[in-house]
Image (cartoon, coloured by chain):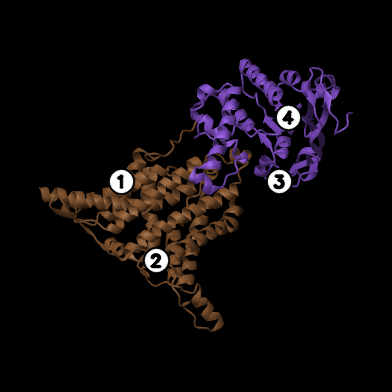
Chain colours: A purple, B brown
Amino acid sequence: MKDNAESYVTKDGRTIGPVVMEMKNITLRFGGVEAIKDISFDIREGEIRAIIGPNGAGKSSMLNVISGFYVPQDGEVWYKGARRPSMKPFEVAQQGIARTFQNIALFEGMTVLDNVMTGRLTHMKSGMLSQMMWRGAAEREEIENREIAEKIIDFLEIQAIRKTPVARLPYGLKKRVELARALAAEPSLLLLDEPMAGMNVEEKEDMSRFILDVNDEFGTTIALIEHDMGVVMDLSDRVVVMDYGKKIGDGTPHEVRNNQEVIDAYLGVAHD
Amino acid sequence: MNEQLAFTIEVFANGLMAGVLYALVALGFVLIYKASGIFNYAQGVMALFAAMTLVGIQNGQVPFAHLINAIFGTDVHKFGWHVHSFLAILLTVGVMILLAWAVQRFVFRHLVGQEPIILFMATIGLAYFLEGVADLMWGSELKALDVCAAEGACLPQGMNMWLEGTTYEAFGYGFFIDNLDIVASIIAALLVAGLVMFAQYTKQGRAMRAVADDHQAALSVGVSLNFIWILVWSLAGFVALVAGIMWGAKSGVQFSLSLIALKALPVLMLGGFTSIPGAIVGGLIIGVGEKLFEFLIGAPFLGGATENWFAYMLALLFLVFRPQGLFGEKIIERV
């Protein structure tokens, strides 16, 4: 096991930094149901960390704990070396943790560009009055933010639909716009909740490529949830496997694939 | 015939002016409904409360005078000073912001995620509560509201005279149009332009639109719902103040002011509950529509008093043929 503060270089030459987010003994209950049972794992800077598991394993709940949508009954969340107090989702976002949703949560009435610009909200500082006057600092700030938004739109190849209202876009593109909005926040941790759910093979390949490119180009730390074992194995540096709210595996894709418990969870065990 | 045409034009203009006021009240509804899905029945009472607070501050009334006198056996009613109109308006805006905060903190924060009907019921409760508070705070007698004439300090004397003027000569006819109405329209137009600019170009405006569109997504980009809700209630309070000033200046500040909320309902059905331009256009259509209908059809053929029901009938027709209103979002449920 590597030390928390240590960096190392992967086989394909990317540098993985020290631990940026650490979950310690997280337990989450809904009434009598334990969605997450005493799970600990960490996320290192610059890596792609996958959380996988069968339906109802508690993966999305875990992501919701990280992004502040759920408050765990037990356990600690450590972010950038400090224990994070219980926070509202918008406060978590202001700390530099951006996310996408399993069922897409976009501003349907706005254009793609406007949606991406909302991702910049946490970076806008000018006061209400100066912005209404539309001068100096506020204007400069708006232009800077616009440039970053446009860069991300280019990067994800959605220039052609910049001015299209999101409601009119097909599912696959909506997923990409949501990714663009999350990226616009220049997050230090990006959470993707099933970024490839409901996509066909071609769309999945596109999305995988974008995720890899984002990680490569911006050095963004990514934690993602995925169903599709094949995709996860190609994409991620390390994998956490959950089943019925428990952690049953944690390690490189290779280690996880050969873990008997994981194989049982995915393929089922013969009861005899 | 020409006489008739001139009259029609005059009625049309007066209708536009009335429409502006309807639009203002409707605007307050739209702001809150868009951002939080709450249909704020108390919007009319907020206009009343704002107008009463303004008059009370202007005249140097002691708030809760009756209550204080009853408890401490004193006999205070007035501070004995007059507050400059401009300062009084600023103070009233402050009071409305405080009210917005209190409403959010003590009522709606505890009702997050409840059914719309429950939120609606809460606003009905709020309306009666606020009416009671307004009564207790400032007394229930009819008061005159003179935004500028109070000490003659706010506008030059000539302006005051002009504000009270009414008649215009054009094409050889005398048109009867209140100058006060013209000023009111201009202020309303500026207010709407300001609101649109605010929503389009500021950080808070963008956050407001985000919340109006999707709460979950807004949270995920770092927007505090609570802050935005206080903001929209403050804006609605401000709009209510402007509406209250205008109605108050026309017909005095009295408790029937709160009934203008009922006039805003058909406006909303026409314009759509979620559209700011809809509230404006809807207000104008109803204002002009009811005046023209009364003048051309109601008075000559139907025995008059059609203004009381015309707006509601028009709204009913819209409900049948275009339930989302002129500009509202069409509701499509995919199956």
Q: Give the foreground label among 1 and 4.
A: 4
Which residue corresponds to mark 3? A87
Which residue corresponds to mark 2? B255
Rounded to the nearest angstrom, the CA distance separating label 1 from label 2 is 26 Å
Looking at marks 3 and 4 on the same chain, the residue that comes earlier in the sequence is marked by 3
> Do residues under tags 3 and 1 come within 8 Å of each other at their CB atoms?
no
Front-lying residue, A73 or A180:
A180
Give the chain letter at badge 1.
B
Quarter of the picture containing the C terminus of chain A is top right
| Tags 3 and 4 both on a single chain | yes
> Do residues under tags 1 and 4 come within 8 Å of each other at their CB atoms?
no
SS under mark 4: loop
| Tags 3 and 1 both on a single chain | no
Q: Position of residue B3 (x, y in %)?
A: 12, 51
Sort mark 2 into few (<14), some (14-19) or many (20+) by Cα contacts within 10 Å. some
Rounded to the nearest angstrom, the CA distance separating label 3 from label 4 is 21 Å
Three-letter code, disc 2? Phe
Three-letter code, disc 1? Ile
| Figure check: A228 above or below B330 | above
SS under mark 2: helix
Rounded to the nearest angstrom, the CA distance separating label 3 from label 1 is 48 Å
Q: Give the foreground label among 4 and 2.
A: 4
Q: Position of residue B132 (x, y in %)?
A: 48, 67
Three-letter code, disc 3? Met
| Figure check: B207 above or below A256 | below
Which residue corresponds to mark 1? B285
Q: Looking at the rendering, which quadrant does residue A154 occupy?
A: top right
